[in-house]
Amino acid sequence: MDSFTKEDEEIKPPSSLANKTTWFFAHSALAVGSWLALMMLGQVFNPPGIPQLAILLISFLIPMIVGFAINSARQDGMATVVWLVGLIWMLIISLYVLDMPTGPGQCLHCDATEKLSRTLFSLPKPSGLIDDDGPFLGTWPAAALLGYAIGARIALRPKR
């Protein structure tokens, strides 16, 4: 017959949208906060000559470790979807960059793909747009949110 009874419903409280939303933004803040702490630490020590690819990798790995640690302690499925914030942030920055005018010293005669790759990844060289802070403003925070979500997913135990 029906294995679901009224007693089962009383044991499990229904999850509320407000609770999920609060934890979603809390996890997003933790991911960006761990990345900002990493950036501040880099400003304090100011090591010379670190390639941007290494900074991208560290911006991914440190929040991944933080996401793993937090979701190991407190299991929460909302921690695994913060990558959406990173995607939306990267799209906003990309749209801003695409709307910027070009000129001498600022990606003159660049098409859209070159404008984005040179601004967000500095490949093959920086574009000169947004003061060459494209990786700092767009790519590294998005990588931090993605890393946090992956770390949280690795730590998430299956429900029994």
Image (cartoon, grey):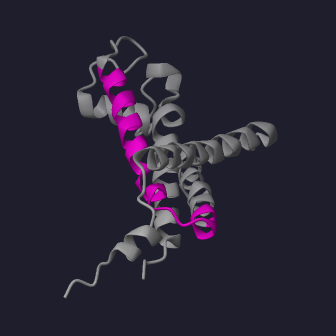
- Residue 14 location in percent, x, y? 41, 59
Query: Where, by quadrant of the figure, is residue 62 drawn?
Result: bottom right
- 13 in relation to 41, above or below: below
Instruction: Depth check: give the residue in front, 12 or 157.
Output: 12
- Residue visible at 51% across and 31% down? 137
Name the residue furthest front: 6
Placement of the N terminus among the 4 image quadrants: bottom left
Image check: 1 left or right of 43? left
Can residue 21 be seen at all in this image of the molecule?
Answer: yes
Instruction: Depth check: give the residue in front, 12 or 99.
Output: 12
- 69 in relation to 31, above or below: below
Span of residues in magenta: 69-98
User: Main SS of the magenta segment?
Assistant: helix
- Residue 15 location in percent, x, y? 42, 57
Can residue 49 be seen at all in this image of the molecule?
Answer: no
Image check: 88 left or right of 22? left
- Residue 4 location in percent, x, y? 29, 79
Placement of the C terminus among the 4 image quadrants: bottom left
Instruction: Depth check: give the residue in front, 70 or 59.
Output: 70
Q: Is residue 15 magenta?
A: no
Name the residue furthest left: 1
Name the residue furthest bottom: 1
- Residue visible at 46% across and 66% down? 153
- Residue 43 location in percent, x, y? 74, 36
